[in-house]
Image (cartoon, grey):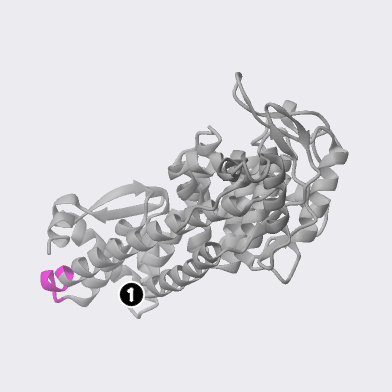
């Protein structure tokens, strides 16, 4: 893959004995923005350079290069592979894996912003949706649960963005950092360190409204590839930064939910972990695309983000494949261990939950096991006796009392996972 050369670096390749650097850069800009493979939008991002003035004169554009189109094709192929793998594992394992990704997505999108969250805390809320009112992160989790249903996030107006923000971050933003405009912030913020400003943002709510109105039009363009729309929209939202706090979490939720609905759920829920693993690349991509000298060309940003999405997909495929192979080994060893069909079923359900769940709070309960086997025609009292017998034989151990939960004991689990 050839790294796309932005204007900021292209200028150094100009032979100034033939043409001045200024004229050469302008000629190259005109060639790109008027190219057959170029998409020119009606969005004007806030651009910045420390030695230059802010500018919004250039329309955001990107070139649909062979590399960009190739990466998009790869993402769709990986999505098909993920879907096939996910469909090829049993139900408890599938639900456990999806819930694990859900917990991690919420945990990591917060961690990227320096907000500490606990996996067990998230898992407890996911596992007890009827009693989560008023609990921290409950609002966030409820919105993310919509991604499991592949529910499309519809943004048709500025108020839709504010409603999404309120729903996602209810109780998570301090009073002093809540928006002070009608919908958005109405004051300045900056991105950078105490020593350096990386990017200067729209100052007033009026500027924000103009930027986001153009973004909404772009998001609802039916002629663009969904992945391209998701990535470009993510850049523009973060470039606008309509809130004092919570922009990163809102922006990542938007792209995660959109990928979940348009590509597949597991791809959408692998995004924040992939970003966390490539955080330097992620933030550098934003800074580079926001430079005034690059004239609102987001082609390289798109390429970088597509690579991050692909990395997340590869992690999912590797994780699913490894766990599927271990589960096959465990199931084979369970059959070797006992000929009793009910015992096999109990151990199989526990093994699926134990292998594919990352948190105790979302692991399978005894009642879940009892109901699952009861639906297969086994009396509830009989399943309870089997659970008690397995505990007495030290093959399973209790992990929770309310609700009652068990897992396969470590010595027995080691034996079951041996090939």
Query: What residue would you read off at disc 1?
Result: 379
The quarter of the picture where the N terminus appears is: bottom left
Looking at the image, which residue is at 60% across and 58% down?
A: 257
Residue furthest to the bottom: 377
Q: Is residue 225 left or right of residue 210?
A: left
Query: Which secondary structure dominates the residues rendered in magenta?
Result: helix
Looking at the image, which residue is at 45% across and 60% down?
A: 98
Is residue 170 in view from this perspective? no
Residue furthest to the top: 195
Q: Is residue 367 left or right of residue 293?
A: left
Residue furthest to the front: 17
Q: Is residue 398 left or right of residue 211?
A: left
Relative to residue 381, is residue 314 depicted above or below?
above
Q: Is residue 334 magenta?
A: yes
Relative to residue 141, is residue 352 depicted above or below?
below
Is residue 19 in view from this perspective? yes
Residue 222 percent across, percent down from the top left: 73, 71
Q: Is residue 153 magenta?
A: no
Residue 17 percent across, percent down from the top left: 62, 41
Q: Nearer the viewer, residue 154 or 361?
A: 154
Q: Nearer the viewer, residue 236 or 382?
A: 236
Q: Nearer the viewer, residue 108 or 92?
A: 108
User: How crowded is the residue under tag 1: few (<14 C-alpha within 10 Å), some, or many (20+)?
Assistant: few
Relative to residue 246, is residue 83 depicted above or below?
below
Residue 153 percent across, percent down from the top left: 69, 60
Find the magenta span and give its range.
Answer: 333-339
Q: Quadrant of residue 182?
A: top right
Residue 111 percent across, percent down from the top left: 50, 37
């Amino acid at each position: 893959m050839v790294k796309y050369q932005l204007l900021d670096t292209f200028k150094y390749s100009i032979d100034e004995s033939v043409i001045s650097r200024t004229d050469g850069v302008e000629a190259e800009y005109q060639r790109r923005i008027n190219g057959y493979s170029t998409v020119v939008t009606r969005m004007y991002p806030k651009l910045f350079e420390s030695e230059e003035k802010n500018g919004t004169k250039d329309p955001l554009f990107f070139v649909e290069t062979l590399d960009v189109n190739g990466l998009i094709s790869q993402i769709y192929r990986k999505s098909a592979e993920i879907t096939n793998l996910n469909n090829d594992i049993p139900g408890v394992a599938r639900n456990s894996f999806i819930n694990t990704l859900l917990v991690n997505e919420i945990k990591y999108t917060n961690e990227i912003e320096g907000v500490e969250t606990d996996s067990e805390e998230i898992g407890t809320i996911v596992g007890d949706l009827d009693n989560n009112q008023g609990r921290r992160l409950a609002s966030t989790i409820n919105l993310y649960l919509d991604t499991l249903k592949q529910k499309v996030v519809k943004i048709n107006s500025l108020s839709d963005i504010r409603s999404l923000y309120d729903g996602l971050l209810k109780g998570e933003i301090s009073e002093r950092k809540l928006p002070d405009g009608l919908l958005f912030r109405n004051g300045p913020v900056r991105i950078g360190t105490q020593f350096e400003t990386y990017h200067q943002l729209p100052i007033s709510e009026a500027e924000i409204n103009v930027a986001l109105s153009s973004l909404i039009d772009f998001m609802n363009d039916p002629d663009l590839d969904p992945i391209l729309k998701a990535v470009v929209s993510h850049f523009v939202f973060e470039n606008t930064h309509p809130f004092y706090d919570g922009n990163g979490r809102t922006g990542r939720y938007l792209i995660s939910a959109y990928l979940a609905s348009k590509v597949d759920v597991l791809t959408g829920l692998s995004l924040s972990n992939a970003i966390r693993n490539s955080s330097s690349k992620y933030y550098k991509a934003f800074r580079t695309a926001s430079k005034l000298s690059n004239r609102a060309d987001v082609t390289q940003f798109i390429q970088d983000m597509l690579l991050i999405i692909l990395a997340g997909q590869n992690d999912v495929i590797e994780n699913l494949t490894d766990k599927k192979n271990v589960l096959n080994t465990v199931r084979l060893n369970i059959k070797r261990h006992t000929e009793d069909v009910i015992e096999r079923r109990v151990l199989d359900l526990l093994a699926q939950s134990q292998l594919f769940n990352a948190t105790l709070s979302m692991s399978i309960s005894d009642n879940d096991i009892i109901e699952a086997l009861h639906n297969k025609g086994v009396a509830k009292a009989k399943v309870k006796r089997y659970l008690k017998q397995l505990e007495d034989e030290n093959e399973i151990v209790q992990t929770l009392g309310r609700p009652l939960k068990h897992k396969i004991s470590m010595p027995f689990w080691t034996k079951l996972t041996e090939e």
